[in-house]
């Protein structure tokens, strides 16, 4: 079978690109991944630092804690059984996620171990998709699936050649060993033919006028000294790994110090939780009368006994388990002697909403939906609708009942 190029491929007209590429598209394409890296890197770095700076994230009594988020996720996730078992490890899991996000963000921003950072980012996004946003409808309204696919170009190609420490270190290692730059640039073979100086009417002067053949092109396969070239490539690779590891150690220690400082500043700003704070209210409510009454709940003509009305006060609600569904519920005293109750499962993705006494509303710790405390309606989404209202009455015996 002849290997001769067809006459059309040899004409000067056909040696041009087969389409009119935008001006400087080739050079500009090297920057194509930079905006994506910038967005993903900043987002993951911010998410990690935000968790470290928020003492409530590691405090199981806080509505924004990893415990509260895992509890909510376990309720609706297809990985329900797994998440239920992980609840007792919520704090170590939270710390691991925060540190991983910082490392992934830094790696992506700096272009350092870019592919590994991208794989880590994709795994975090995948786990968030299965635990938090699995039920988003339509599916594209959940952000985690978008993040998951946004990582894929970086997994395929790494950080690219621009603003990338990986690329820079490889180029420096190659330069110091006298090897050609390891940067790869795609060039149409017609351009190689036009520039190599050996091509003439479908023949290759460098190959004794044999037909030009891309597979054996001396320009593409090098000088023939492949053994030496591969040894040099190995040396470049080794040096790159050493320099990259040393750089990683420096970046890692700096990031750890910065993260620890961020966590300390977060604690200082947050201060010590007080008895009147949200955390204390939640803890008190769980262990006082309404909760106790539920576990040994009794019914009367008024409904299911929840507990003594005196254990609920304005600005100090109580939580309980709704007997019919097993969902968490809350009872709030709006004005003296007037009570409202809600199923606290967030209509967005099932996290447990918490009462925020500072602004008298119910707030979801997962994606920050807000609800009016008087009727459960949505103040701010993403929750698509309000909380399920419960019918709470106070009996003449001074107890609260769920009807
Ligand atoms: S679960 Fe997303 S806002 Fe509540």
Image: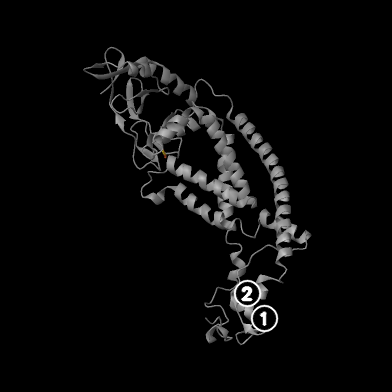
First reached walking from the N terminus: tag 1 or tag 2: 1
Tag 2 secondary structure: helix
Q: Nearer the viewer, residue 329 or 161?
A: 161
Disc 1, disc 2: CB below 8 Å?
yes
Figure quadrant of residue 256: top right
Q: Which mark is residue 309?
A: none
Quick check: can you spot residue 132?
A: no
User: Hey, which residue is sitting farthest left in the picture?
Assistant: 301
| Residue drawn at the location 59% of the way across and 44% of the way down | 45
Quick check: can you spot residue 166?
A: yes
Q: Quadrant of ligand 1?
A: top left
Residue 3 coordinates in the image, percent (x, y): 55, 80
**Number of on-image labels:** 2
Q: For mark 2, does the 10 Å Cα neighbourhood hold few (<14), some (14 to 19), or many (20 or more) residues?
A: few
Tag 1 secondary structure: helix
User: Hey, which residue is sitting farthest front in the picture?
Assistant: 1
Residue assigned mark 1: 207
Q: Nearer the viewer, residue 285 or 39?
A: 39
Residue 332 coordinates in the image, percent (x, y): 37, 25
In the image, taking residue 371 as reference, residue 120 lies left or right, namely right
Q: CA distance from mark 1 to mark 2?
A: 9 Å
Residue 143 coordinates in the image, percent (x, y): 45, 48
The answer to whether residue 275 is above or below residue 65 is: above
| Residue drawn at the location 53% of the way across and 78% of the way down | 18
User: Hey, which residue is sitting farthest top in the picture?
Assistant: 397
Look at the image and tell me in which quarter the C terminus lies: top left
Q: Nearer the viewer, residue 336 or 55?
A: 55
The answer to whether residue 27 is above or below residue 109 is: below
In the image, taking residue 146 as reference, residue 137 lies left or right, namely left
Residue 180 coordinates in the image, percent (x, y): 72, 65
Q: Which mark is residue 216?
A: 2
| Residue drawn at the location 61% of the way across and 52% of the way down | 114
């Amino acid at each position: 079978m002849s290997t001769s190029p067809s006459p059309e491929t040899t004409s000067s007209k056909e040696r041009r690109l087969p389409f009119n590429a935008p001006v400087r598209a080739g050079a500009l394409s090297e920057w194509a991944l930079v905006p994506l890296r910038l967005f993903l890197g900043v987002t993951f770095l911010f998410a990690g630092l935000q968790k470290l700076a928020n003492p409530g994230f590691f405090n199981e009594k806080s509505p924004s804690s990893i415990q509260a988020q895992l509890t909510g996720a376990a309720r609706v996730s297809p990985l329900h059984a797994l998440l239920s078992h992980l609840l007792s490890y919520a704090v170590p899991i939270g710390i691991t996620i925060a540190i991983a996000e910082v490392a992934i963000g830094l790696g992506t921003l700096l272009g350092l171990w870019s592919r590994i950072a991208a794989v880590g980012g994709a795994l975090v996004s995948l786990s968030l998709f299965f635990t938090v946003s699995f039920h988003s409808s339509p599916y594209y309204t959940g952000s985690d699936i978008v993040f998951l696919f946004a990582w894929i170009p970086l997994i395929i190609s790494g950080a690219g050649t621009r603003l990338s420490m990986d690329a820079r270190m490889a180029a420096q290692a190659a330069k110091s060993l006298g090897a050609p730059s390891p940067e790869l640039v795609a060039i149409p073979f017609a351009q190689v033919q036009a520039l190599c100086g050996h091509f003439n009417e479908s023949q290759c002067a460098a190959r004794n006028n044999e037909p030009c053949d891309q597979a054996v092109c001396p320009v593409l396969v090098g000088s023939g000294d492949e053994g030496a070239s591969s040894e040099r490539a190995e040396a470049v690779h080794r040096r790159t790994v050493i320099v990259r590891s040393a750089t990683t150690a420096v970046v890692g220690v700096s990031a750890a110090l910065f993260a620890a400082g961020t966590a300390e500043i977060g604690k200082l700003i947050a201060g010590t939780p007080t008895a009147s704070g949200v955390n204390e209210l939640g803890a008190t409510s769980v262990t006082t009368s309404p909760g106790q009454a539920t576990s040994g709940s009794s019914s009367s003509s008024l409904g299911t006994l929840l507990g003594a009305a005196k254990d609920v006060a304005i600005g100090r609600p109580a939580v309980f388990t709704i007997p019919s569904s097993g969902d968490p519920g809350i009872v709030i005293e709006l004005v003296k002697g007037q009570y409202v109750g809600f199923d606290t499962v967030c209509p967005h993705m099932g996290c447990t909403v918490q009462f925020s006494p500072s602004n008298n509303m119910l707030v979801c710790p997962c994606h920050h939906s807000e609800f009016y405390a008087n009727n459960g309606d949505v103040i701010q989404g993403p929750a698509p609708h309000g909380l399920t209202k419960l019918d709470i009455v106070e009996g003449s015996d001074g107890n609260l009942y769920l009807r």
